[in-house]
């Protein structure tokens, strides 16, 4: 289903739901890149203006997945080693968690920890399958951070959101769409799509965020592949945390087929990604 973004945004405003604005650092970066008026030092100065985003960017970029084994001590090095486009994608991901947060509520902290771990798993899967799938680690990481971003938006709007949907524990699955729609007449995947659109994410990433709870039969190419990567990353997150994943049996065949993973090697592949994930956590 295609969402009429303008109409949907007006409906959210009427319900008191606010789409987070893009922070200045992101607007300044996009403006510099659009004008093709930049060098590494200028981009580094723009990013350094936001200490919070800078700290998170360093943490993500120093992962072997992005650093390529090189020691990164300055923003100039991050941009040179990771690449301009990839750095911008990582900054978008970092900026989101700063834009939608509440440091006084444990649920927000749990949410962003989960999102970061799903993002790391998605990036690892994308890096391993890139020759088959043509989705790159920074794109998968960005989608992993954004994929459930409608949840904290609704947490800010409805104080009882976590409790009513039983999301206030660390060992929970995430919202049942039917129950969410019944209680609040809105669902987090549609909101996530609108946030992604508002933040100018690539179209295929926006679509993957909208469909990440489904098997997008009508979506082809990068969207379908990115949905599969997200679904596998979410499944692996559940497996590592020893949490039941009720959706997996329904989507398993689609995911494995889309990513070119043979069913007989499913457990072996999980163990391989899990080992790399633990290495990146150190």
Image: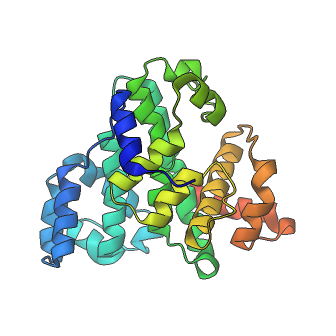
Q: Which residue is drawn at 48% across and 36% down?
A: 151
Q: Picture quarter containing residue 149?
A: top left
Find the residue positioned furthest to the right.
264
Q: Position of residue 117 (x, y in %)?
A: 53, 49
In front of the other: 212 or 140: 212
Q: Where is residue 191 in the image (x, y as percent from the top left)?
A: 45, 42
Q: Which residue is drawn at 20% across and 58% down?
A: 27
215 with respect to 265 (left or right): left
Q: Position of residue 10 (x, y in %)?
A: 34, 39
210 with respect to 219 (left or right): left
Can residue 130 be seen at all in this image of the molecule? yes
Can residue 58 be seen at all in this image of the molecule? no
Find the residue positioned furthest to the bottom.
131
In front of the other: 3 or 130: 3
Q: Picture quarter containing residue 180?
A: top right
Q: Picture quarter containing residue 75?
A: bottom left
77 with respect to 120 (left or right): left
Q: Residue at x 46, y 50 (%)?
A: 193
In front of the other: 228 or 232: 228
22 with respect to 42 (left or right): right
Q: Position of residue 240 (x, y in %)?
A: 67, 46
Q: Residue at x 61, y 76 (%)?
A: 133
Q: Is residue 129 above or below residue 165?
A: below
């Amino acid at each position: 289903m295609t969402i009429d973004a303008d109409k949907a945004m007006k409906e959210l405003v009427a319900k008191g739901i606010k789409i987070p604005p893009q922070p200045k650092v992101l607007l300044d970066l996009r403006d510099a890149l659009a004008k093709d008026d930049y060098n590494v030092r200028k981009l580094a100065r723009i990013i350094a203006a936001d200490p919070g985003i800078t700290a998170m960017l360093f943490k993500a970029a120093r992962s072997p997945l992005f650093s390529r084994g090189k020691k990164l001590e300055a923003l100039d090095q991050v941009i040179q080693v990771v690449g301009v486009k990839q750095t911008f994608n990582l900054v978008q991901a970092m900026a989101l968690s700063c834009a939608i947060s509440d440091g006084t509520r444990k649920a927000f902290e749990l949410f962003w920890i989960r999102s970061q771990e799903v993002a790391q798993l998605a990036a690892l899967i994308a890096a391993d399958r890139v020759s088959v799938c043509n989705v790159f680690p920074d794109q998968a990481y960005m989608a992993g951070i954004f994929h459930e971003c409608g949840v904290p938006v609704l947490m800010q709007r409805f104080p009882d959101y976590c409790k009513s949907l039983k999301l206030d524990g660390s060992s929970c699955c995430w919202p049942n769409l039917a129950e969410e729609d019944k209680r609040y007449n809105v669902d987090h995947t549609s909101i996530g799509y609108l946030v992604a659109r508002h933040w100018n994410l690539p179209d295929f990433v926006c679509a993957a965020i909208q469909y990440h709870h489904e098997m997008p039969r009508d979506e082809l190419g990068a969207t379908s592949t990115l949905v599969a990567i997200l679904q596998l990353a979410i499944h692996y997150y559940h497996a590592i945390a020893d949490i039941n994943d009720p959706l997996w049996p329904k989507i398993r065949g689609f995911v494995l087929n889309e990513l070119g993973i043979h069913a007989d090697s499913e457990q072996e592949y999980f163990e391989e990604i899990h080992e790399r994930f633990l290495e990146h956590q150190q």
